Image (cartoon, grey):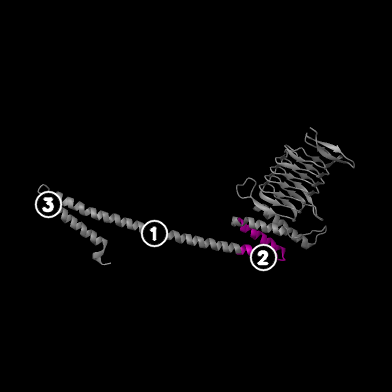
């Protein structure tokens, strides 16, 4: 830009012209003193300089804002690229860990399980996917003989690690976070402990729950199915603890076979509770349990000490051929009674009226 074309030159020229023009015009007036004329002319010229200064500051401000906007967009682009890199690394890490779950060495499989759990902790959006993979591993066929060989023991160690990591990844019962689903259909589990956890839906259809299962203090926000758990050859449901848990949706135990004691003390069934065709070989406790929707005990069979003193019962209760053993202690709600049959069985029935 040529000097005479610059805004500063034009501003200086306009200021001089105004100074001379206004000053000369005022000097032509006899009523105006020379000092007043020069002062007024200086103010006029200074006003032009001030306007130029304001324009210059505004221009600098706009330039700075433009620079900051460019810098912000650059940072956003860098952050987006970094996030894409993290997602790519996470995807590669996930794929590699899943691949290693098929490795022959048990220590490699354990390492892969921990890698998946670590990924879920660092990337919460992976948590449900990782839980699905851990559950899928536990659904793999597994048989443990009465005299297990070293390979069976090593595989059991891997599976117990998967169970423990599932528990660690689940939020606490009263946590505000999302409730994750677990699909353990047909799984063979041992010492499963999900106590005090928040769980969405839980599928344990045809599952085998050996030794003990601890679900006390859980809150289930989705549908829970234990349908026919423990019914196939070699399967069972061992000691089952579910004290003080909350089933917000349906709880389906139809056809489940409990080989040992089952404890549902103080548990709340917010949705339908179905124990149709369930078999309880050991003692059963329903003391203090609340059922708010419906209760189905049709053809349920109780072989041990039985306490069915629910704290509250719904209007819809099905008791058709609900059997207990007369030689065992049986405690019932006030509205129920026993009708003795032969061979030591008794049928639970609702009192007339």
The residue sitting at the left extreme is 30
Mark drawn on residue 99: 2
Q: Is residue 243 above or below residue 111?
A: above
**Is disc 1 surrounded by few (<14), some (14 to 19) or many (20+) residues within 10 Å?**
few
Mark drawn on residue 27: 3
Asked whether disc 2 touches disc 3, contact meaning CB atoms under 8 Å apart, the reply is no
- Front residue of 282 and 254: 254
Tag 2 secondary structure: helix
Q: In the figure, residue 186 lies in which quadrant? A: bottom right
Residue 282 pos. (x, y %):
81, 45
Q: Which residue is mark 1?
A: 66
At 66% from the left edge and 59% from the top edge, which residue is drawn? 114
**Is disc 3 surrounded by few (<14), some (14 to 19) or many (20+) residues within 10 Å?**
some
**Is 129 inside the magenta-drawn segment?**
no
At 21% from the left edge and 58% from the top edge, which residue is drawn? 14
Cα gap from disc 2 to disc 1, whole angstroms: 49 Å
């Amino acid at each position: 830009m040529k000097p005479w074309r610059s805004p500063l030159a034009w501003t200086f020229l306009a200021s001089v012209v105004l100074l001379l023009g206004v000053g000369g015009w005022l000097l032509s007036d006899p009523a105006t003193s020379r000092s007043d004329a020069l002062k007024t002319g200086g103010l006029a010229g200074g006003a032009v300089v001030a306007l130029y200064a304001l324009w210059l500051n505004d221009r600098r401000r706009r330039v700075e804002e433009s620079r900051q906007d460019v810098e912000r967009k650059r940072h956003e682009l860098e952050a987006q690229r970094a996030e894409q890199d993290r997602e790519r690394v996470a995807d590669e890490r996930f794929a590699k860990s899943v691949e290693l779950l098929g490795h022959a060495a048990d220590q490699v499989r354990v390492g892969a399980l921990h890698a998946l759990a670590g990924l879920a902790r660092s990337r919460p959006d992976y948590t449900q996917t990782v839980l699905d993979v851990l559950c899928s591993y536990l659904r793999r066929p597994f048989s443990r003989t009465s005299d297990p060989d070293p390979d069976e023991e090593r595989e059991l160690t891997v599976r117990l690690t998967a169970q423990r990591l599932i528990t660690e990844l689940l939020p606490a019962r009263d946590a505000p976070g999302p409730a994750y689903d677990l699909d353990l259909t047909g799984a063979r589990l041992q010492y499963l402990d999900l106590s005090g956890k928040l769980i969405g839906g839980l599928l344990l259809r045809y599952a085998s729950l050996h030794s003990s299962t601890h679900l006390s203090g859980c809150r289930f926000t989705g549908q829970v199915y234990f349908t026919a758990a423990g019914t196939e050859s070699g399967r069972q449901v061992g000691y089952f603890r579910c004290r003080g848990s909350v089933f917000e949706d349906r709880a389906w135990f139809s056809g489940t076979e409990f080989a040992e004691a089952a404890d549902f003390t103080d548990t709340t069934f917010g949705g339908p509770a179905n124990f149709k065709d369930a078999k309880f070989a050991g003692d059963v406790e329903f003391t203090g349990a609340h059922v708010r929707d419906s209760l189905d005990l049709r053809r349920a069979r109780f072989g041990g000490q039985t306490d069915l003193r629910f704290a509250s019962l719904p209007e819809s209760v099905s008791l058709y051929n609900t059997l207990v053993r007369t030689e065992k202690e049986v405690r019932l709600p006030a509205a129920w009674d026993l009708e003795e049959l032969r061979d030591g069985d008794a049928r639970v029935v609702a009192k007339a009226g």
